[in-house]
Image (cartoon, rainbow, N blue to C red):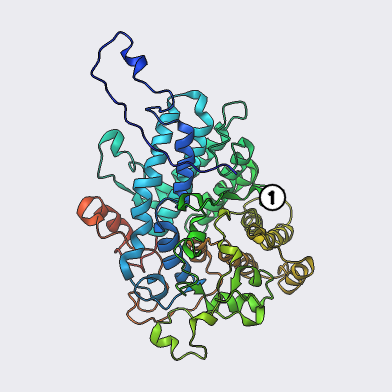
Amino acid sequence: MTKKISIIFCLVILLGSCTKDFQKINIDPNKPSNVPIDYLLGESELMVAGSNDAGAKSWRANIANSACIIQQLASTDAGFYGGNFYTSASNTFTAYFDGAYPNAVKSLVNVINLAKADARNVNMLSMARILKVMDFTKITDLYGDVPYSEAGRAFLDNNFTPKYDAQKDIYLDMLKELDESATALNATAYVPTKADYIYAGDVNKWKRAAYTLMLRLALRLQKVDEPTAKLWAAKAIAGGLITSNDETIAVKYDATGAQLNSNPNSWIFNPSGQNVANVNGALWSKTLIDMMVSRQDPRINIISGIKNGDTTIVKQLGLPNATDANGLSKLPVTTLDNYSRPSVPMIALANSWVYMSYAEAKLLLAEAIERGYVTGSGLAIDAFKDGQLNALKQVSIYGLTPTAPRMANYAAKNPYPAAGTLDDKMKAIHTEIYLLHAATFNHIEAWANWRRTGYPVLTNLTPTGNETNGTIPRRLKYPTSEYGVNPNIKDAISRQGADLFTTRVWWDK
């Protein structure tokens, strides 16, 4: 596995002597003053995953907020896990916004700017544009209207107060970016094989990834603008989706011990990182564990274990969301060590960081077929079965795979309701997606998909001190610091609504 590289910018030392060969003599060929664009691309991929931010994206945004809001993880720590209590605890809701702009966004804007200057870098340009869409999808899904078209460009044009773009405009531009990037990818041009930790420079896989991401974004518009959703979903499917679990859109790691070389979600739970699993910081929720048990889900003893490492199914116990220390004392089991948390195999530092899986692509294809967005792409039931099976197999990234008999039993227990209503079919499809996202630490996407579809049906909670009047949050609030540094935030609030957890983003109206 390619080692991840920490980029160190070198200073050129000016000597006082003066000769006709001054420039040649004083340039060290082993210490370039300009970092090769390949390395900037690779570093950007790691930044999108959050490998460099000490848990801003993974711990605070993905786990402390999204995972708890969507009732996949839970915690008794009301001072940090705000999503579990619908509060602003420790301001963890600001983390993705605060972490993305000075890191991944700025880095990708730089790569795009540099790549545009040389036609030979067409593939790195396309990859960077796709990566930028990947990060901005999460930013806008979490917050709604955000700086987009002018973001990350202060080092180029000195604009330190970028405008807040409307989410509608952001989504339409991201769809365009994916389309243009996929079209521009060129297998005969230079590819950065060593600096690409997703597909090792495989242009054809990147092309299919772009169309797969396009399908996800297209369906996000289903509730607010169905004609546009149908148009882009058809384009995505015609372009060609990823074809197997091996093509799952994921950053690969080698886990040398440093945070930069480790899956950021694993690093949060692993004893070599923040050790959240062993200190009972974040545990699997009762909603998730009960659902997996009732469905006889064969992944349960692969992704879940109690503190002593026991993965025996009958011992798995989920913590009810909104339970604080006082509430824990009133439960039948009062010792957190006996509640389930991500298993040891699931938090290995070398695990791949999954952004979007092949299984999700197939399940979304089933939805597109059922909604009549596409024809000639087979039967929805076949796409569903393929997605369901590969969602189970996706946990093989943890070194374990359910047995064939257990997977067959799961399929028999949870069949596709081919003769049912559209709602019945959406419930089946999106329950599978919910479980898939939990099993891959993809909680931000799980929350976004739930807000669009309403599946699975979740219960509103009334945590002590909650800021939502007991309703599940629909977005995260903007960082308080934005009010003091960017006056354009007022335009976003004027369009979108009050800066509250309960305000719905554009595609969730």
- Coordinates of residue 15 in the picture (x, y in percent): 26, 21
In this view of the protein, can residue 487 be seen by the observer? no
At label 1, the amino acid type is Ser
In this view of the protein, can residue 326 be seen by the observer? yes
- Residue shown at 61% from the left, 76% from the top: 291
Circle 1 is placed at which residue position?
Answer: 244
- Coordinates of residue 311 in the picture (x, y in percent): 64, 75
Horizontally, residue 250 falls left or right of residue 492, namely right
Horizontally, residue 289 falls left or right of residue 472, namely right
- Coordinates of residue 24 in the picture (x, y in percent): 37, 15
Image quarter where the C terminus lies is: bottom left
- Residue shown at 43% from the left, 23% from the top: 29
Horizontally, residue 381 falls left or right of residue 347, namely right
Position of residue 32 relative to residue 47, above or below, is above
- Residue shown at 49% from the left, 59% from the top: 267
Position of residue 290 relative to residue 334, above or below, is above
